[in-house]
């Protein structure tokens, strides 16, 4: 089967997570992703190592299916090799701090002159324009400034970050969309273009529904929230409220562990069946819960009844019972549950790979399934593992040329 992005060469200067998550996705779609690292390597290779002298899991789980070369961009010989690679590539990706690529001498204007067909793609904390343009950013900075922190957690507690990496990988997925659109545009225009994604913008985009609620506040309280919203100007933290037109919450189940909860959505259509299951005919005809508006007004009482029922069942048992009557629900799966979840395994979402130094370990698989181009997940590279291979294959260098370049400091410290 042919890969969707076969023939696309990506020169990948990204580091940490937002960029690498995106270039890994492109590699899984079949692009030849050449990770161009400083001679010291992507900093995450050495961060939070669980095994001495072995690339961290952070690195190995975000850089699968790539080739690694080292190029010293602060040496003239290194820059010359970089220019040659630029001319042979379709996409250049980077997520350096503001101004780093300009300081190397490779602004978009310069890159576009060197290879007009090349797509250049950047992630920045806040983009290249506006009052925050000069600031660096990490995951939680983006969550704080994109609206996620203010709206996550419980209203009587502090703002919270979410465990999902919406600032980094979330931005990376926006990045992939931009690059794929630019590649498609190039097929008929013949021209490259500049793709930019700001982490704040990406998180804000994911908080769209909270901005819906923000505007609704001008016209009255947010009736679906379990906390009072009358007179507020900021959308409150909604705890585990569903945030949608239907009521939802996490029910505490038998077991008492920190993840022994089942999230349930009380859809209008399933209420009679759910009420019958939980409280029989009496509850079905209880006027406090007759229609969705009644259940909203009396939701505390409704959740008490549902929690009482849940306390007699484990989260898995309750999932089975509720699914029997078509109630949308899901147990809160901890990382141990997830690592052993047969559904995720069957969908190849937690896959074993073999790293040259680490040996066998697991990574999260490809969430986008292409019928004619399924992803085959292979290991992340060692630092500089493919420098010679890429120089020979892509640039046609001889062993002698490589040796001379190496002696000049093009690939290592000068
Ligand atoms: C993530 C971030 C905060 C890290 O900051 P940092 O560690 O100071 O790294 P920077 O990207 O600013 O700088 C990288 C440095 O490595 C150097 N470098 C990078 N690749 C190099 C290479 N191949 N050869 C030589 N030097 C290299 C750069 O020149 C720069 O040094 P300089 O400041 O002397 O110019 C910053 O990169 C950033 O804000 N990125 C944009 C937003 C983002 O993606 N955030 C991370 C999400 S996971």
Image (cartoon, rainbow, N blue to C red):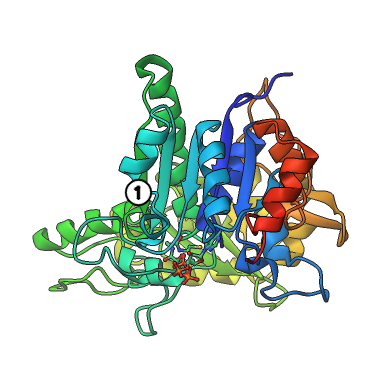
Give the side of residue 264 with respect to residue 52, left or right.
left
The answer to whether residue 161 of the structure is visible from this angle is yes
**Residue 108 position within the rendered picture, expressed as x and y whole percent measured from the top left:** 34, 44
- Tell me which residue sits at (71%, 36%) in the image: 397
- Tell me which residue sits at (24%, 57%) in the image: 211
- Residue lying at the far top of the rendered structure: 188
Mark 1: secondary structure: loop
**Image quadrant where one finds the N terminus:** top right
Query: In this orientation, which residue lies closer to the viewer: 197 or 327?
Result: 197
Residue under numbered circle 1 = 107
Q: In which quarter of the image is residue 336?
A: bottom right
Q: Quadrant of residue 204?
A: bottom left
**Residue 169 position within the rendered picture, expressed as x and y whole percent measured from the top left:** 52, 55
The answer to whether residue 326 of the structure is visible from this angle is no
**Residue 20 position within the rendered picture, expressed as x and y whole percent measured from the top left:** 57, 52
- Residue lying at the far left of the rendered structure: 219
Give the side of residue 347 with respect to residue 143, left or right.
right
Query: In this orientation, which residue lies closer to the viewer: 358 or 364?
Result: 358
Q: How crowded is mark 1: few (under 14 residues within 10 Å), some or many (20 or more)?
A: some
- Tell me which residue sits at (69%, 77%) in the image: 257
Query: In this orientation, which residue lies closer to the viewer: 322 or 200?
Result: 200
């Amino acid at each position: 089967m042919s890969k969707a992005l076969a023939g696309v060469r990506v020169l990948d200067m990204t580091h940490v997570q937002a960029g690498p998550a995106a270039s890994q996705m492109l590699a899984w779609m079949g692009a030849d992703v050449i990770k161009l690292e400083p001679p010291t390597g992507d900093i995450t290779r050495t961060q939070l190592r669980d095994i001495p002298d072995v690339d961290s899991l952070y690195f190995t789980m975000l850089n699968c299916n790539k080739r690694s070369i080292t190029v010293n961009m602060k040496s003239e010989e290194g820059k010359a090799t970089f220019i040659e690679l630029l001319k042979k590539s379709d996409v250049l990706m980077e997520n350096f701090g503001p101004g780093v690529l300009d300081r190397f001498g490779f602004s978009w204007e310069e890159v576009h002159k060197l290879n007009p067909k090349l797509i250049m793609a950047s992630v920045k904390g806040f983009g290249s324009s506006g009052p925050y343009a000069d600031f660096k950013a990490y995951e939680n900075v983006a969550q704080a400034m994109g609206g996620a922190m203010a709206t996550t957690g419980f209203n009587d507690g502090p703002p919270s970050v979410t465990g999902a990496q919406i600032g980094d990988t979330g931005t990376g997925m926006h990045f992939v969309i931009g690059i794929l659109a630019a590649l498609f545009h190039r097929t008929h225009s013949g021209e490259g273009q500049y793709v930019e994604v700001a982490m704040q913008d990406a998180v804000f985009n994911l908080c769209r529904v909270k901005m819906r609620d923000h505007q609704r506040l001008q016209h009255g309280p947010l009736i679906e929230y379990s906390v009072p919203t009358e007179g507020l100007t900021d959308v409150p933290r909604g705890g585990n409220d569903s945030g949608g037109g239907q009521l939802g919450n996490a029910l505490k189940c038998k077991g008492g562990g920190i993840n022994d909860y089942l999230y349930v959505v009380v859809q209008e259509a399933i209420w009679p069946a759910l009420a019958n299951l939980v409280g029989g005919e009496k509850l079905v005809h209880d006027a406090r819960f007759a229609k969705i508006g009644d259940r909203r007004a009396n939701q505390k009482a409704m959740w008490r009844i549902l929690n009482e029922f849940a306390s007699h069942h484990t989260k898995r048992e309750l999932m089975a019972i509720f699914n029997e009557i078509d109630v949308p629900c899901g147990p809160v799966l901890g990382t141990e549950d997830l690592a052993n979840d047969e559904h995720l395994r069957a969908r190849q979402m937690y896959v074993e790979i073999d790293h040259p130094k680490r040996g066998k370990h697991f990574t999260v698989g490809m969430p986008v399934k292409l019928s004619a181009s399924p992803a085959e997940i292979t290991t992340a590279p060692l630092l500089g593992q493919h420098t010679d291979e890429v120089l020979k294959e892509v640039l046609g260098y001889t062993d002698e040329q490589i040796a001379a370049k190496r002696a000049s400091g093009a690939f290592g410290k000068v």
